[in-house]
Image (tube, coloured by chain):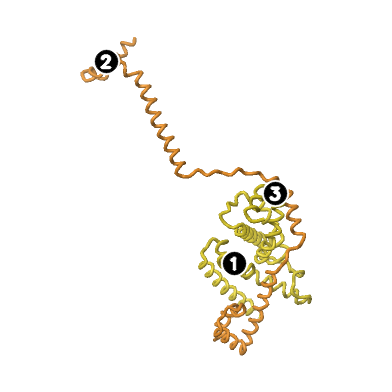
Amino acid sequence: MNCSQTRAKLMDYQSDRLDPQATFEVENHLSDCEQCQGFARELSLFEAIMQDEKNHQPSPSLTNRIMNQIAQEPKAIIHLPQRRIPAFAAVAAIALLVLIGVFGGIKLGDQITSGLVNTPARQAEISSLLNELDHEPLEQMLFNLNNSEQ
Amino acid sequence: MNNPDLVQGLKAGDQSAYRKLVEIYQQMVINTALGFVGNIENANDVTQEVFLEIFRSIHSFREQSALSTWIYRITITRSLNHIRREKRFSGQFHESADESFSLSDNPEQKLEEADRKKILHNAVNSLPRNQQIALTLHNFEELSYKEIASVMNRSVSSVEALIFRARKNLQKKLWTWYKNSQL
């Protein structure tokens, strides 16, 4: 095992993650290589720092400091649980509103036009106008309408 | 007090529930923060920010994950924000020589240890973000791959790959430092 291969395995070696064969090879190389020995020593110091930071105990006053900060916060607003409308219910509601709008619009339109068109007298008047349009140029019709209004 | 009761108490604004929360989780939070920020003073600041954040946003916790998972996520976010703020103000990752937190009584060794901590945390913080998070949770918090996967919202195999790459990259960075220090 050369230096590069040994260095690649050093962190695992120090964490006891290597199989026995690999452990033997690393130890064999370290016994002959001062540079890799030096690096292994540094890695073990870094490992010791990590271990030490894992075991840090919080200061006893930290809890009180945190609670004091929380106490200074504006009172928490109690949020009512938000009921989520299922997606299909929302889609159905929107579709229903659209249908009501369309149907209502049609009905409303019918009511407006029925007042103008659906009386027999009005229908007769329109029919006569329609009949005359075939034989009368537009300008003449407009002239006649104008005269009748006067 | 089991977790559902605790969460209910937190959402109701019960001060005793918050005290209980801090007592149960402060070590977890401070150790995780320490793994990222590298010194006790900054870790304490981050810890206070985390519990304030929990107080302010407990109503957004939907209880779809474990409370601890949610707290880990807040801790990671706050820690990374802290590192970013420190970099912005100092132009580099700044760490006070934490001589009060030392493995040694020898002043020279304390200084060396402070330097070594800085080197280690600089190396970890220079890893790609996901490798940094996975490695810190694994090495400093000793979470299992499954727990890390839950915190990071990734698969276990993805976390294994991240930690493998992180360790290799960290080893390369530390080797580069060591080689240069010998010149």
Looking at the image, which residue is at 38% across and 21% down? A112
Q: Which corner quadrant of the image does residue B88 belong to?
A: bottom right
User: In the displayed structure, does residue A61 sit left or right of residue A102?
Assistant: right
Image coords of residue A134 (percent x, y): 21, 20
Q: Is circle 1 on the same chain as circle 3?
A: yes
Looking at the image, which residue is at 50% across and 43% down? A85
The residue that label 3 is drawn on is B14
The residue that label 1 is drawn on is B132
Indicate which label's residue lies in the foreground, 3 or 2.
3
Image position of A3 with respect to B21: above or below: below
Q: Is A88 or A35 nearer to us in this picture?
A: A88
Q: Which circle's residue, 1 or 3, is located before the other in the chain?
A: 3
User: In the displayed structure, does residue A56 sit left or right of residue B145?
Assistant: right
The residue that label 2 is drawn on is A124
The kind of residue tagged 1 is: Gln
- Tell me the crowding category of disc 1: few under 14, some 14 to 19, or many 20 or more residues within 10 angstroms, Cα based: many
Instruction: State the quadrant of the C terminus of chain A.
Output: top left
- Tell me the crowding category of disc 2: few under 14, some 14 to 19, or many 20 or more residues within 10 angstroms, Cα based: few
Chain bearing tag 1 is B
Secondary structure under the numbered disc 3 in the rendered image: loop
Q: CA distance from mark 3 to mark 2?
A: 82 Å
Image coords of residue B162 (percent x, y): 54, 69
The kind of residue tagged 2 is: Ala
Image coords of residue B31 (percent x, y): 67, 65
Looking at the image, which residue is at 32% across and 13% down? A146
Secondary structure under the numbered disc 1 in the rendered image: helix
User: In the displayed structure, does residue B85 sit left or right of residue B150?
Assistant: right
Colour displayed for chain B in the image of the structure = yellow
Q: Residue furthest front?
A: B1
Looking at the image, which residue is at 46% across and 45% down? A87
Q: CA distance from mark 1 to mark 3?
A: 36 Å
